[in-house]
Image: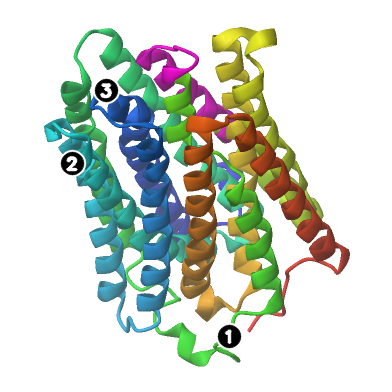
Amino acid sequence: MTLLRGLGRQAAAVFIALCLVSLFADMTYEGGRSVIGSYLAGLGAWSLVAGAVALGDLLNYVFRGVGGFLSKYVRSGRGYWALVFLGYGINLLAVPALALAGRWEVALALVMLERAGKGLRTPLRDAVLAEVTEPLGRGKGFGIHELMDQLGAVSGPLIVAASLTSGRGYPATYSLLAIPAAASLTCLAIASLKYPKPKAVGAGRGVRSGRLGRGFWSLTAVTAALAFGFIHWALVAYYARTSLRVPAYGIAAAYALAMGADAASALPAGYIYDRVGLKSLYAAPPLALAAVATLLLGRPWLGAWGSLIASSLMWGVSMGFYETVSRAALAEAVEAGLRPYAYGMYGLAYGLAWGAGNLAMGALLATYPAGVAALSLAAQALSLAILAALTGRGGVRVEPS
């Protein structure tokens, strides 16, 4: 395969297996998340509760910190993969369990559980990806992974939209998502057998310093500011359903469109990163702001459907750039043995910012929607200012350990 030229047979097999893990996993939980805002609205929740879904993502990122912290004490490949399996198991099985939720409190609790599982396994998986994709160029490697990831994120919402359109309802629709969940766990088992002992296992003891450097924290500040003003899809779905009056299947289709835009932008973002470095991240903050402004202010010119579609496209491209570029850059900002820990700490800071920003947006959405756009404008301006200072002094690369 031309895209994987340079990888050895074992590394290619592990990389493909992990890409399939993410494809099926995203099919599962992104399918469920595509309509969680409207599902909560149907269960009697109000806008602040929909905004509180972002707390699930905060929990996701808190548990990235937990996973990264625990990785420093794992001394065997078996223990390393056990943490990954635990995270994926919780992450994936909580989604079809939403079929049994009859109250918004139960549904919200399952969302929180699903996000915690995702957080636990993500830094450890990303550290393995950083190891096996090094010969490709990390931008390209993470771009391919993000592309596969988002193919699942597109197909999952489309499955949900088709199921809802056929009249199955939310419980039956969530039950269907048990199938890709099982496929993801099967591919994960293959990856663990092909790569039984990641290099990160116990490697933290041999690095020059146990501290994360200035480049790491500067990059984290850039994306934390971006996250504070990046509207959560649960709020997009809530606003689209309650104010734009878009039906639930339309919201799921719009989410699939956003994930398609993410997928389409991921590989170009990776190639651009490999050529120009962190400057490739300049695209993300303006697009994140435009997504908010179009959703809330675009109806007089674009109509309800047009506002949602245009917002979804910009939302997805912004996500494609920052997820691909930040993961590639983080791998080069810290020494190899600290990567799982670094991914975890980065995720924790990012999640705190995203959770706080979306709680504020949820409260503003109920009283002063234009304030959401103003908040996003301030946050993205700050993100661009920090990024300009960081790229002006050469980026985040460090000498290898």
Q: Who is closer to the viewer here, 400 or 320?
A: 320
Does label 3 or label 1 sit earlier along the sequence? 3
Q: Nearer the viewer, residue 255 or 294?
A: 294
| Image location (x, y in percent) of residue 273 | 73, 51
Q: Quadrant of the N terminus?
A: top right
Check the image and report above or below for 304 versus 267: above
Which span is picked out in magenta?
241-262
Q: Is residue 279 above or below residue 371?
A: below
For residue 211, the mark is 1
Dot 2: few (<14), some (14–19), or many (≥20) neighbours within 10 Å?
some
Task: Find out whether residue 206 is within the magenta segment.
Answer: no
Residue 155 picture location, percent across and down: 39, 26
Q: Earlier in the sequence, mark 2 or mark 1?
A: 2
Does residue 171 appear to the left or right of 220 in the view shown? left
What separation in Å lies between label 3 and label 1 (alpha carbons)? 47 Å
* Distance from Cα at disc 2 to Cα at disc 1: 40 Å
Identity of the residue furthest to the front in this view: 367
Disc assigned to residue 12: none
Residue at 30% across, 53% down: 188
The kind of residue tagged 1 is Arg
For disc 3, the marked residue is 42
